[in-house]
Image (tube, rainbow, N blue to C red):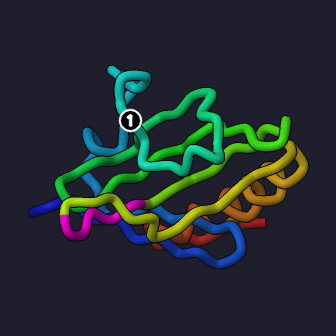
Amino acid sequence: MQARSIYADVRGLICLGEQNQQNMQPNLEGAQAEQLPLSSFYKVIDHVTIFRSEKWWEAVVLIESYGRRSIAMYLWQKRNDKWKRKHKFQIRDPRDWEKVKGAVDKLIPQLSGQSISQ
């Protein structure tokens, strides 16, 4: 079975879909050697590839523009031998991240059908 990713771009909730445990580990090897398909407008400070296949590429990227840094989560799809951005979600400050993290932490137990006891 081929690994799949599902992107739910609902104001900041990104959910990685059915992948086996091995594919869920970020690919940290050679991260600096990969050339990300980003506009030259952004300065790439660092990045981590989450998943990559012949057709899909997911990465978390620390970018800088106009002297301000942000973390962007990207999903690209390869079409006609070119990577095209499918989704992008940016976190501009730690407070944004805490909101997103809190929402994901609240919903994550529901991925496996676990009930939440309060």
Image location (x, y in percent) of residue 22: 25, 39
Q: Residue furthest right?
A: 95
**Does residue 69 show up magenta in the picture?**
no
Q: Residue at x 39, y 61 (%)?
A: 76
Above or below 35: residue 24: below
**Does residue 79 show up magenta in the picture?**
yes
Q: In the drawing, does residue 29 fall left or right of residue 72?
A: left
Q: Residue furthest front?
A: 40
Which kind of residue does numbered mark 1 sit on? Answer: Gln
Q: Quadrant of the C terminus?
A: bottom right
Q: Residue at x 52, y 68 (%)?
A: 87
How many numbered marks, from 0 up? 1
Q: Which residues are magenta?
A: 76-80
* Callout 1 crowding tier (Cα within 10 Å): few <14, some 14–19, many ≥20: few
Above or below 102: residue 44: above
Q: Which residue is mark 1?
A: 35
Above or below 73: residue 35: above
* Predominant secondary structure, magenta span: strand
Image location (x, y in percent) of residue 101: 73, 53
- Residue nearest the observer in this picture, 3 or 30: 30
Quarter-wise, where is residue 109 in the image?
A: bottom right
Quarter-wise, where is residue 79 in the image?
A: bottom left
Q: In the drawing, does residue 35 fall left or right of residue 109?
A: left
Q: Quadrant of the N terminus?
A: bottom left
- Residue nearest the observer in this picture, 6 or 85: 85
